[in-house]
Every structure is written in structure tokens, then in C-alpha cells.
């Protein structure tokens, strides 16, 4: 359920039905409710603002809801909620303390996925403690008719060897102005079993709600405060709940009245990605393309020859003479941080080539900067603008738009005229382009990227969170067209006690030079990109890695083949040849920024089996659920990946420093039947990553294609106004 504003004006049809209440046309207040007649009061209560929506908070059991019970709604699409509380179920009366760590996300419309780590340590009597990691899923039914209440079905504690908190439920919630009523039926663990229900009353626009619930043969009452969106912090919302349970009894029959406190943060990644800011600078004039500049005609390389050839040919419809200040355009593009810039003409199409290593979160920002600057510099005779994106000097793909429509889009912000005419192509040909620039602009000589390398254990018998954190410092040096040299050095930053000196010592990361490899990217036809890398990897093994990507024609889908061949030398000096690899098909569904990838892998341990992952992109944040199966065991997990680098990084030069554009934080467990051990076997179901990954270094994390760039037009416009427009007011050196 979407969050709504504090200030609400009732819909027009309500005014028509209650014209005798003039205060209904103003901001709603308690005084307005008291002075309006009952019918108008009922109409207003139906439109009472949800500030914020009830479903934006997790219950203590981990699903969206009230204090302890789930509600009939799910988390808004793309919202992530993290929380901590100290509540305990009645069956754990012998634990004097405990914590619940929670995270939930609206993974799809009407679908919520959440997780809970219950940590109830041993008490002073040395009673055995409980530490359980569980996953939950919840489905909301679409609203098919007016005034339909919120209805949801869910399952807590999905498949696993220890179903401590497993419960299936159906729940219905409805709102009557500031009052929400919930009733449901569950079957499973005692904390959510049988009939349950509750009510929540929002106390005007204070952000405070009073809640009372009945479940597990006990009554819980409490207060909850939910803040408004904090715009300076990415529209994050904070909530605090205090509650007290009455009438609860433990398994031994003893009274178990208890108090609890819950803290939560809700981060709206989805709504942030969808609500692209419409940039309208105050000094934005009504802009028209620059006129022809005859004084610059003599500066165009080949202009005289082209004019003479056109006159000799005597064409009935000669190509118009296009004059553009290409030197100024190239200077502005270079000042924006783009490398290897070159300007040319292909008939009436203006062509801009560049390489980007500054806007590392998303190539759409660099494309927006280049298109915006080119559109502002293009004279009226230019019909289209095409930008070609290169990597290590190799042209990878091209995005082109109609010049006049894109210029109008920059002015007004409406992309409807641009979208149907936007074109996309892999391996753009530049043979027919008449290059106006005598040479490419400068490029950076090296890049240093620092990626966190994290090995972690969540919710094990040894601890809540054990880890080994290291810095993977990578050096990239361009060699020749399509080729780069990569070196990787790993340095340990911190380790938990169990990893540094305990049973989990095998998870310590080895320090030193992990890899030194040279990579070459080449096109094997118009739709197949191949990258082969050779050198030293895995701290001393010699090997080759090859990654082939086939771009399915007329679709965004990709087929990827990864192969690794290692010459491994063991502790005793014995050498062996090892082979790993995977083959997968990546399917895109652009309306939801959804991808599904199905593949088959040969893992590092020699085991093999199918893999499946489903991902949603919310801007530059990716949420993913995945399943990896082998002939030894299966793993299921959740990953939340986010960039650790600014949207605009350092200017290129001799070298520059950048962060990771894609850092996945994964939590996974063994897929086990009830009663089986959830113990994870080290060294199996593990993939060997590519040292020089095509998706990371060349293909914008796979986010390419015509439909993708059509969806990114508002972001591209924003990038131009944010990063490039200020440069046009500053004279650039040619």
C-alpha cells in the first residue's frame, strides 16, 4: 500500500455529495470532523490519509503487519525494511533475553519476501539456546472490486531442517478512516496458530498509532511512532514500537507477561527509482538550435570535398551542409569526464563516440550527458544524434534519438516523442562516418577499484554473525583496442573471533596478489561479444578464462557461456588441470525491471547442477532470490546488491580511484527437509567468478537494450542537467 501525504484534500465527488460542509475543501483536522455532519464525516473517514501506510512496518515475526500479527497488505513494491526487536514467543519463557533481526522487501507487486534471525542465547541455568534463520513469503490478492479489503496469504519459516517458526495463514485487513481492523486464521507454531486479530488507531497526524492484538491466547497492546519521509536521507522512514503482552503462559504454565521494543527503518528503493526528479532550472530559456555558422565551414575536415562531390553528382536532393562547432562540443564532453571522445557526421546524423569510467553506477548517466550536450550543439540540419559507447577503445553499442524531439524533451521533460524513435544497436559500424575531430580526446591511463570481499556466516550455532572482511584492490590498465591488464591484491581488514582464532578459521581470506591477467574483447559477429583472459589467478595458478555473450536479436535477452581452465599446483607440488564453467540464459521483462536467469554450472568442487535466479532492479539497487543445486546439496539465498561508488566519480587522468558499482550482500542456507541438518558443506556449490567480468566491466550489469534506455530517458535528462549543463556556461579550452 503506497504511502500518502499528511495533507489531503478530499476527492471532488465527495465535495459534490457534501456541499454543506465548507471545511471539507480545506486541510482536514479534528475540528473539521467534529463540525461536519455525520454523512460528510463518513465520507471523509473513507479518504483519511495513511501516514505512513500500515504495511510499511514489520511485525515481530518478520512479516509486514502490526505488533505481532501480519496484516492483509504487503510492503510497497521496492521498499526494504530492516528492524531489530527484543520480543520472545511464550514458548521461550526460559530465555531471559533475546533479539530478532529482520529484513523484508516488496520484491514484486503483491509479493513480499522477508527474513528473520531469532537469537535466544542460553540463560544462567545453561539451558540450551535457540538461534534460527527463517524466510517468509506473503502474497496479497489484487483488488478486483471497490471497497475490497486487503487480503493476503503467507507462509512463515519456509523449507529448512528446523521449522521452529513455521506457520501458514490467511489474513484480512480493512480501514475505516484512522482505524484499521485485522482478522486472520493460521495453522502452525504456537505464536501464530488459530484465530488472531487486532485493531490499530492512528492518532491524527502525529505519526503515533495505538494498537491492540489478540493471538497465541494472549493480548498485546502498544504504541508505535512512524516518522515522515526524511528527504535528505533518501526518503527513509523510521519507526519505534513499545508493547506489552498480557495473559501469556509458557509451556510450563507459568505466566509470561512481557514487554518489548522494536526499531525499524524503511528505505523506499522502488519509489525513489520511479520518482525521477524533473529538472527545470530557473534560468532555462526557450531554446532553439544554433544557426548555421558560415565562419566555421572552413574548419570542417572534408567539408569542401563533400560539397564538391555533391555538386558533381548533381543529386536531386543533396545532403544539407551541416556546420557544427565540433571542437567546443568535444571539449565539453571531455570536461564532463568522458574519454576517447570523437565527433562525426553520417549523412544528417551527428555521431559522438566516447568511453566512460566516471559515471560508474549506470552507463545511462554517461549516455544522458553525451546526448544532452550533443543536442544543445546540433544545428537545425541534424536529424538524429547517435552516441557510441566504447570500452578499452572498442565500440560496444550505440543509442540514437531524433535530434528535434530530444531537444524538446530537454525543454519540457516529456519523453513521448523520443521513445518510439529511440534506436539501439550492438557493434556500431563507424566506417561510413565522416569524422570531424582529427583525433580522439585523451583517456585515463589507469584505474584503481576497491571492492569489499566478504565471507560471512549468519545465524550459525557458533554466533549471530561471523565474517572475514578484506579489501580487493584492482588495477586496470588499458593496452590496445579491446584489451586491458588487470591485477588484484587482497588485504584482510577485519575478522570475527570465530574466524580469526576459532572453528571457522578455514574462512580466512588469503592475502597477497590474487590475479594478474590480460583480457581481450573482440566481436564474433554483430551479436556475439567474446572476452578471453589469460595469466595468473587464484594466487598462483596459471589459467585461461573465456566469457562469450550472445545478444538475442530483437530482445534484451542474453545467453552467456563462461569457461575457466586452471593448471593447479597443490601443497605437494602436484599439478592438475581443472575445468569449471556455466551456461545460462538471461531473460528480461523490462516493465518491472525483472530478470530471470536459468543455467547449468560445473562448480569449483567438481559438483554440478542447475541454477536459477530472479532479480529486480530498483534504480541501481538489485534484489535477488536464487537457487543453486548440485549432486551434493542445494543452496537457496537472498541478495541485496547496491553501489559503493558515487554516481559521478573522479575525473580520468594518470589514475583515478573508484568504488564497486555492484556489491552484493548475500544470505544463504542449505535447502533441507524437515528434520535434516542445515549444515553447509564447505567447497561445494561454489562458482569461480571471472576476474574480468563482461557484465561488470563492459555490459552495465547486463542493463542494455532499446527498451532499457527508453525506460531511462528521465534519468538521462536529469544526468545532463546535473552534470553537464553547468559546464556549458564555462568556456572550454580546445
Image: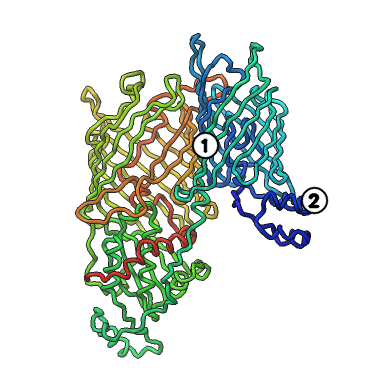
Kind of element beneath mark 1 = strand
| Between 71 and 516, the one nearer to me in the picture | 71
Kind of element beneath mark 2 = helix
**Left or right for 475, reference 555:** left
**Count of picture labels:** 2
Do the numbered discs 1 and 2 sit on residues whose CB atoms are within 8 Å? Answer: no
| Between 174 and 705, the one nearer to me in the picture | 174
Q: Can the viewer see residue 595?
A: no
| Between 613 and 621, the one nearer to me in the picture | 621
**Left or right for 287, reference 523:** right
In the rendered image, which residue does mark 1 sit on?
264
In the rendered image, which residue does mark 2 sit on?
38
Among the 4 quarters of the image, the one containing residue 94:
top right
What's the residue at 40%, 89% (across, down)? 316
Identify the coloring. rainbow
The residue carrying pointer 1 sits among few (fewer than 14), some (14 to 19) or many (20 or more) residues within 10 Å by Cα, namely many
Amino acid at each position: 500500500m503506497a504511502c500518502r501525504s499528511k495533507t489531503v484534500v478530499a476527492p471532488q465527488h465527495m465535495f459534490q455529495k457534501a456541499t454543506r460542509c465548507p471545511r471539507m475543501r480545506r486541510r482536514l483536522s479534528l475540528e473539521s470532523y467534529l463540525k461536519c455532519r455525520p454523512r460528510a464525516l463518513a465520507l471523509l473517514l473513507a479518504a483519511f490519509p495513511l501516514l505512513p501506510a500500515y504495511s510499511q512496518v514489520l511485525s515481530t515475526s518478520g512479516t509486514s503487519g502490526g505488533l505481532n500479527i501480519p496484516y492483509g497488505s504487503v510492503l510497497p513494491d521496492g521498499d526494504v525494511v530492516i528492524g531489530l526487536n527484543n520480543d520472545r514467543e511464550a514458548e521461550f519463557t526460559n530465555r531471559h533475553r533475546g533479539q530478532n533481526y529482520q529484513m523484508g522487501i516488496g520484491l514484486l507487486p503483491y509479493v513480499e519476501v522477508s527474513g528473520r534471525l531469532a537469537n535466544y542465547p542460553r540463560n544462567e541455568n545453561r539451558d540450551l539456546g535457540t538461534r534460527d534463520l527463517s524466510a517468509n513469503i506473503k502474497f496479497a490478492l489484487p483488488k478486483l472490486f471497490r471497497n475490497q479489503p486487503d487480503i493476503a496469504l503467507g507462509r512463515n519459516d519456509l523449507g529448512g531442517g528446523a521449522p521452529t517458526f513455521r506457520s501458514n495463514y490467511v489474513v484480512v485487513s480493512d480501514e475505516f478512516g484512522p482505524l484499521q481492523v485485522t482478522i486472520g486464521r493460521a495453522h502452525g507454531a504456537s505464536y501464530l496458530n488459530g484465530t488472531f486479530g487486532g485493531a490499530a488507531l492512528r492518532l491524527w497526524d502525529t505519526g503515533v498509532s495505538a494498537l491492540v492484538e489478540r493471538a497465541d491466547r494472549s493480548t498485546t497492546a502498544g504504541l508505535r511512532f512512524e516518522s515522515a519521509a526524511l528527504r535528505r536521507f533518501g526518503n527513509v522512514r523510521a519507526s519505534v514500537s513499545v508493547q506489552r503482552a498480557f495473559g501469556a503462559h509458557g509451556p510450563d504454565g507459568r505466566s509470561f507477561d512481557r514487554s518489548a521494543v522494536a526499531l525499524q527503518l524503511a528505505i523506499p528503493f522502488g519509489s525513489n527509482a520511479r520518482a525521477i526528479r524533473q529538472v527545470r532550472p530557473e534560468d532555462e530559456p526557450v531554446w532553439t538550435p544554433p544557426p548555421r555558422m558560415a565562419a566555421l565551414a572552413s574548419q570542417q575536415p572534408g567539408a569542401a570535398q563533400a560539397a564538391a562531390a555533391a555538386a558533381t553528382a548533381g543529386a536531386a536532393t543533396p545532403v544539407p551542409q551541416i556546420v557544427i562547432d565540433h571542437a567546443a562540443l568535444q571539449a565539453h564532453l571531455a570536461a564532463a569526464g568522458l574519454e576517447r571522445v570523437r565527433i562525426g557526421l553520417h549523412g544528417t546524423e551527428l555521431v559522438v563516440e566516447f568511453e566512460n569510467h566516471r559515471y560508474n553506477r549506470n552507463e545511462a548517466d554517461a549516455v544522458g550527458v553525451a546526448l544532452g550536450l550533443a543536442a544543445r550543439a546540433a544545428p537545425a540540419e541534424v536529424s538524429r544524434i547517435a552516441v557510441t559507447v566504447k570500452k578499452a577503445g572498442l565500440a560496444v553499442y550505440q543509442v540514437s534519438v531524433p535530434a528535434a524531439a530530444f531537444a524538446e524533451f530537454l525543454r519540457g521533460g516529456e519523453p513521448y516523442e523520443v521513445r518510439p524513435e529511440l534506436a539501439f544497436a550492438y557493434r556500431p559500424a563507424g566506417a561510413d562516418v565522416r569524422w570531424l575531430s582529427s583525433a580522439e580526446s585523451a583517456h585515463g591511463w589507469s584505474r584503481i577499484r576497491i571492492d569489499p570481499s566478504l565471507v560471512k556466516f549468519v545465524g550459525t550455532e557458533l554466533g549471530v554473525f561471523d565474517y572475514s572482511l578484506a579489501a580487493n584492490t584492482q588495477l586496470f590498465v588499458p593496452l590496445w583496442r579491446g584489451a586491458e591488464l588487470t591485477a588484484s591484491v587482497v588485504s584482510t581488514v577485519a575478522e570475527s573471533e570465530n574466524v580469526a582464532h576459532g572453528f571457522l578459521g578455514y574462512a580466512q581470506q588469503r592475502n597477497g596478489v590474487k590475479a594478474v591477467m590480460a583480457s581481450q574483447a573482440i566481436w564474433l559477429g554483430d551479436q556475439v561479444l567474446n572476452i578471453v583472459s589469460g595469466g595468473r589467478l587464484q594466487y598462483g595458478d596459471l589459467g585461461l578464462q573465456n566469457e562469450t555473450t550472445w545478444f538475442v536479436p530483437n530482445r534484451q535477452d542474453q545467453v552467456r557461456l563462461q569457461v575457466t581452465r586452471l593448471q593447479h599446483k597443490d601443497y605437494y607440488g602436484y599439478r592438475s588441470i581443472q575445468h569449471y564453467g556455466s551456461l545460462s540464459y538471461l531473460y528480461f521483462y523490462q516493465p518491472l525491471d525483472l530478470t530471470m536467469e536459468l543455467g547449468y554450472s560445473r562448480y569449483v568442487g567438481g559438483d554440478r547442477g542447475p541454477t536459477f535466479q530472479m532479480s529486480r532492479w530498483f534504480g541501481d539497487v538489485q534484489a535477488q532470490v536464487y537457487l543453486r543445486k548440485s549432486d551434493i546439496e542445494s543452496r537457496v539465498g537472498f541478495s541485496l546488491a547496491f553501489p559503493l561508488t558515487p554516481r559521478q566519480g573522479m575525473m580520468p587522468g594518470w589514475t583515478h580511484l573508484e568504488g564497486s558499482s555492484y556489491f552484493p550482500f548475500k544470505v544463504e542456507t542449505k535447502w533441507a527437509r524437515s528434520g535434516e541438518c542445515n549444515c553447509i558443506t564447505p567447497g561445494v556449490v561454489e562458482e569461480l567468478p571471472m576476474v574480468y567480468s563482461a557484465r561488470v566491466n563492459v555490459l552495465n550489469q547486463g542493463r542494455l537494450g532499446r527498451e532499457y534506455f527508453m525506460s531511462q530517458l528521465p534519468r538521462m535528462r536529469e544526468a545532463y542537467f546535473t552534470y553537464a549543463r553547468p559546464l556549458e556556461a564555462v568556456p572550454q579550452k580546445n
